[in-house]
Each structure stands twice: as structure tokens, then as C-alpha cells.
Amino acid sequence: MIKSEICDMLGIEYPVFQGGMAWIADGKLAAAVSNGGGLGIIAAGNAPGEYVREQVRIAKSLTSKPVGVNIMLLSPFADDVARIVIEEKVEVVTTGAGNPSKYMKDWKDAGIKVIPVVASVAMAKLMTRLGASALIAEGGESGGHVGELTTIVLVPQVCDATTLPVIAAGGIADGRGVAAAFMLGAQGVQMGTRFLSAYECTIHPNYKEKIIKATDLCTMVTGKRLGHPVRSLRTQFARNYFKAEYGGASDEELEALGTGALRLAVQEGDNENGCFLSGQIAAMVKKEQPAAEIIKEVMEEAEPILLRASQWVK
Ligand code: TUI
């Protein structure tokens, strides 16, 4: 059994976080992951604070285990959500797509464990200084908002820059990825794309099918021109957006193209206008299965790989 410091710190059985996927990671999915021994995380995304409060209450009605909330810092509702996680006594807050410095003191005073996503060494150092409990080092193989560095390059540098436990994210969907993350110095993993295939993940069936049928070169990054690069499946929508981006569309036209695209993918399975966020590892997601089974399977796969690694040492 693979146990690490992060398991004791958070009171979880397996060092596995479920990524806070906007429009996707609701209270039901988070509770299923937490009941399976990982850390389930509700995504605030761009949703109003009251939606997040409702999802926290749903999760807490379904599990007695700790549950986290991911705050997407580009959201117009980030301030509201930052307050609501305190009111709802959420145990763990993760943050994404920005710098959470201005909230850190209030969260820490409320006893919340703050685990920011960092995409650079500078951010890792800053978050360590401001009292984060751990760090998620997310490489650009991940789905959604992406940084510049890959997981294999980012994780060891973040490990060197901090004394905190590091959770690796981006490109991890099976035991080999978990073992590799541990080899790089991480002591836990966060997976997003793999949990898209969980039974308890209530995305549109078209979305699940696209993930399960995905192949190695199935994702692309759009949005760089407006400063918010996002990795998604290489659908007609993504190609059209990319063409508009580099074909002279105005900023306003690009904003209009992107508006509502995540919701259209998740709720309507809209092939033409939906933006199906996905990590590069989608090709390795093979079937629908319960969240608890995913966690157990991935961690059990990692064990013999980690044990075997020492055979090469002569
Ligand atoms: O946040 C994510 N992934 C996301 S958020 C999202 S919703 C969205 N919608 C429209 C535009 C943009 C996002 C979909 N997927 N992952 C965590 C993550 N955070 N990856 C990289 C970062 C990051 C990047 C820069 C964290 C901190 C950072 O610091 C920059 C700074 O402010 O110095």
C-alpha cells in the first residue's frame, strides 16, 4: 500500500486528488472520490458562490470524509467563493489559474489547508512562504488552463524549491504515471482526465465517449493569444477557434466564440460549439468505472512498478 505524509495530513487513504474540473467536478463526483479514499474536489469554476455552497452541502451529505473546493482565480465570483469555503468549513482549498496570495491569511486563520496549483518555481516559493500546506505542481499535459512547463520538468524543480509535500498533476492516468510522479519527488498525484470516465461523473455521454475513443494526438492548446491557454480535445470547435485566433479575429470576437463553450460540452455534448477540456493522457482512459475502482486500480498498478525500479541499481 502506498502511503505518504499527505495522507496523514488530510486524513485520506490514498494520495490521490481528483482535479477540480470546471462545470464537471460537482458534489456528487467529489463525494465518490472521497468515499473511495482519495480527495474529492468540487470545482467552483466560473460559477456563483451559492452554487458552490450547494455542492459542498451535497458532498457533505454523501460522505463524512474530507472534501476540497477548487477556486478558479479568474472567476468573477472568486471573492465570494473564497468567503463561502470558510463559512461552510471546507477542509481543503485548492486554487488554479492564478495567484491566491490575497486569500491565504483568511483561509489559514479559518484552519483550512490551502494547496495551490503552481506552474512555476517562483509561485512554489511564494506559496511556501505564505503558509500553504502542500503544492500541486501541474504540467502542461493537463487539460484546461495550462502553464508552460511539462510535468517531468516542473515537478522536480518544485520539489527542490519547497519543503512542503508536492502533488504531481498533468499527464497522469495510471500506475505508471503515479510511479513516475513519486520518482520525481512527488508524494501524491492529482488526476482529472481519468475521472472523466467515472460513473459518478455526470458529463454528457458524448463527452465520455470522446474521451474513451481519444488517441495520442487528440488534444490541442487554444487561447494563447488572449493569455489563457486551454488544452481541449481537437474538435471542430477547437480548430475553428485556433483559426480565428491566428486569422485576424478581434479580441471581442474570440471572447464571444469562447463564451459558454465549456457548458455546451459538459451539459449538451455539443460537437460543433462545445469546448471539451481534456489532458493529453485521454488516450489511456479506456472505460467507464466507479471512481473508487479508478483510485484503487491506479495505486495498485503503481506498487510493483515502484518496487521493480530498484532492480536496475547494481
Ligand atoms: O486552473 C486550472 N485549469 C483550468 S481552470 C479552467 S476554467 C477557465 N476558463 C476559461 C479560461 C481559463 C480557465 C479550466 N481549466 N489548472 C490549474 C493551473 N493553474 N494550471 C496552471 C495554473 C497556474 C498558472 C499560473 C497557476 C498559477 C499561475 O500563476 C500565474 C501568476 O499569477 O503569477
Image: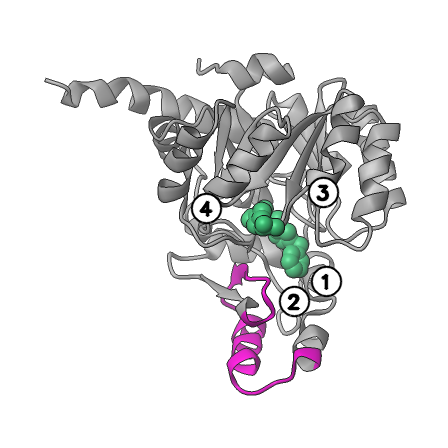
The alpha-carbon separation of the residues under discs 3 and 2 comes to 22 Å
Instruction: Name the residue that disc number 1 marks.
Output: 268
Nearest the eye: 134 or 202: 134
Q: CA distance from mark 1 to mark 2?
A: 8 Å
**Nearer to us: label 2 or label 4:** 4
Q: Quadrant of the C terminus?
A: top left
Mark 3 or 1 closer to N-term? 3
Q: Which quadrant is the N terminus positioned in?
A: top left
Q: Is the residue marked by circle 2 packed among few (<14), some (14-19), or many (20+) residues within 10 Å?
A: many
Nearest-to-viewer mark from 3 and 2: 3
**CA–CA distance between discs 3 and 4?**
18 Å
* Badge number at residue 274: 2
Helix or strand or loop: what does disc 2 sit on? loop
The residue that mark 4 highlights is 139
The quadrant where residue 270 appears: bottom right
Question: In the figure, is residue 115 to the left or right of 169?
Answer: right
Query: Is 235 in the magenta?
Result: yes
Residue 191 in sight here: no
Q: Which residues are magenta?
A: 225-252
Q: Would you name the residue on which mark 3 appears?
A: 71
